[in-house]
Image (cartoon, coloured by chain):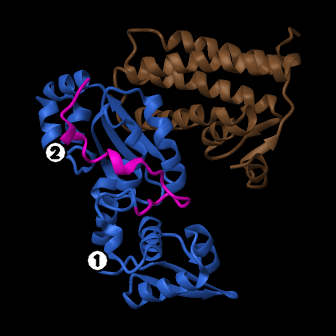
Chain colours: A blue, B brown
């Protein structure tokens, strides 16, 4: 199968670097350039962690270890996030625990923005890079895409292309482990997808009509596949 | 996640298996591999059945290694430990089966029609390949468990 090169722009070339130790991304991966918008990479990694795991609390040493940054850098960025009211701190025993401030009016918006850019999307995009020429469209649907996920929600990923579930799982497995999220990856061939979409198959219809966060391709490309 | 940490968390317990238990589980595997090939069943059901065969195979490995999984998430545990019990090359198999576990949960409990026409036969092929691998692994590592009682 050949495709017009521009169609693959979202997964090729510079996504060849793997996700880093905390499974977020590296500077080189995202083509969104979002990392450069923030004061430091550590800030982005920390913020990503708080946004993606909003029901968990972390202490300083734990965060420094997890994000692979020096403690003083972590402390500096934690102070910044606290000033912005994006996180709260609670002393417990001889430790201070930090967690996301879900009450911040922009919390959900920020999380959605991160999901669409530096966090999940980049991690998935980077992971799918080796399959770039065979994935026509990939998007997150379900509770994650709707911003209604809970701590135990799966990340529902829908893929259309010329690949097996086994191939998808072997590149996506590390992302799920690193983000501590279960991936529910559906893989459809172009033919089956078009057939079921045209026939109004209930699951496909629901997916097509629901919110999506595109990882590969976009709504237009998806429309073309429906035919 | 290591066997030690799963033991410490209470997700695994020590277990002494027998040739009889392994033979019984292999019968579950063979029944489900046969049923998963029935073309009149829905893709969801064939998928769930092939998944069950794969899970029984993973249980055989876990039992032979001296453990059993307990409590909530025992499917997850049984699949997670494959790279440790069978070796790091089993990671891709574990990643695949773990996604199958999630998909099967959705198909069995949440909504019908989510399994694609390619996913069900693929899992059947994978489960058959896994069966061959597990038998080979047993022959190499626990031959006494394959002997007739």
Can residue B83 be seen here? The reply is: yes
Number of on-image labels:
2
Q: Is residue B63 above or below residue A212?
A: above
User: In this view, which residue lies farthest toward the front?
Assistant: A13
In the displayed structure image, the side of residue A12 where residue A47 appears, left or right = right
Residue hosting label 1 = A106
Above or below, comparing residue B96 to residue A110 in the picture: above
Left or right: A144, with B133 as reference point: left
Q: Quadrant of the N terminus of chain A?
A: top left
Q: Residue at x 75, y 51 (%)?
A: B10
Q: Nearer the viewer, residue A194 or A75?
A: A75
In depth, the one of A133 and B75 nearer the eye is: A133
Image coordinates for residue A194, horizontal then vertical, percent: 18, 26
Q: Residue A70: where, in percent of width, then height? A: 59, 78
Quarter-of-image position of residue B16: top right
At 51% from the left and 21% from the top, the residue drawn is B49
Q: Where is residue B118 shown, x and y percent of the image?
A: 37, 21
Image: magenta residue range = A1-27
Residue B28 appears in the rendering: no
**Mark 2 = which residue?**
A219
Q: In the displayed structure, would residue B118 be above or below residue B12?
A: above
Q: Earlier in the sequence, mark 2 or mark 1?
A: 1
Q: CA gap, disc 2 to disc 1?
A: 26 Å
**Is residue B132 part of the magenta span, yes or no?**
no
Task: Residue at 68%, 13% (x, y): give it.
Answer: B27
- Secondary structure beneath dot 2 equals helix
Q: Is residue A9 inside the magenta stretch?
A: yes
Circle 1 packing at 10 Å, graded few (<14), some (14-19), many (20+), is few
Q: Chain of mark 2?
A: A
Report in which chain the residue with disc 1 lies: A
Q: Are marks 2 and 1 on the same chain?
A: yes
Residue A26: percent from left, percent from top:
44, 61
């Amino acid at each position: 199968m050949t495709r017009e090169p521009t169609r693959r722009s979202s997964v090729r070339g510079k996504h060849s670097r793997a996700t880093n130790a905390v499974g977020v991304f590296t500077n080189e991966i995202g083509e969104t350039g979002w990392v450069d918008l923030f004061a430091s990479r550590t800030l982005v990694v920390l913020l990503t962690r708080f946004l993606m795991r909003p029901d968990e609390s972390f202490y300083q040493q734990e965060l420094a270890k997890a994000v692979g940054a020096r403690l003083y850098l972590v402390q500096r960025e934690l102070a910044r996030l606290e000033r912005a009211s994006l996180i709260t701190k609670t002393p417990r025993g001889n430790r201070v625990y930090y967690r996301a401030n879900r009450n911040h009016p922009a919390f959900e918006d920020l999380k959605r923005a991160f999901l669409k850019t530096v966090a999940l999307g980049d991690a998935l995009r980077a992971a799918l890079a080796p399959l770039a020429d065979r994935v026509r469209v990939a998007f997150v649907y379900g509770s994650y895409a709707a911003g209604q996920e809970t701590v135990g929600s799966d990340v529902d990923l829908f893929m259309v292309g010329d690949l097996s579930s086994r191939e998808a799982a072997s590149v996506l497995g590390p992302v799920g482990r690193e983000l501590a999220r279960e991936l529910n990856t559906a893989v459809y061939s172009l033919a089956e997808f078009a057939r079921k979409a045209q026939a109004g198959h209930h699951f496909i219809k629901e997916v097509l009509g629901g919110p999506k966060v595109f990882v590969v391709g976009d709504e237009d490309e998806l429309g073309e596949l429906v035919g | 996640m290591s066997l030690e940490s799963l033991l410490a968390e209470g997700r695994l317990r020590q277990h002494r298996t027998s040739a009889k238990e392994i033979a019984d589980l292999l019968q579950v595997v063979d029944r489900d591999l046969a049923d998963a090939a029935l073309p009149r069943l829905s893709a969801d059901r064939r998928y769930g059945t092939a998944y069950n065969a794969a899970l029984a195979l993973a249980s055989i490995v876990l039992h032979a290694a001296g453990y059993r999984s307990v409590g909530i998430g025992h499917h997850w545990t049984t699949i997670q430990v494959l790279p440790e019990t069978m070796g790091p090359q089993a990671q891709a198999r574990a990643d695949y089966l773990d996604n199958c576990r999630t998909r099967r949960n959705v198909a069995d409990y949440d909504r019908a029609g989510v399994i694609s026409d390619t996913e069900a036969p693929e899992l059947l092929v994978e489960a058959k390949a896994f069966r061959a691998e597990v038998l080979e692994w047993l022959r190499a590592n626990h031959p006494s468990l394959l002997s007739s009682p």
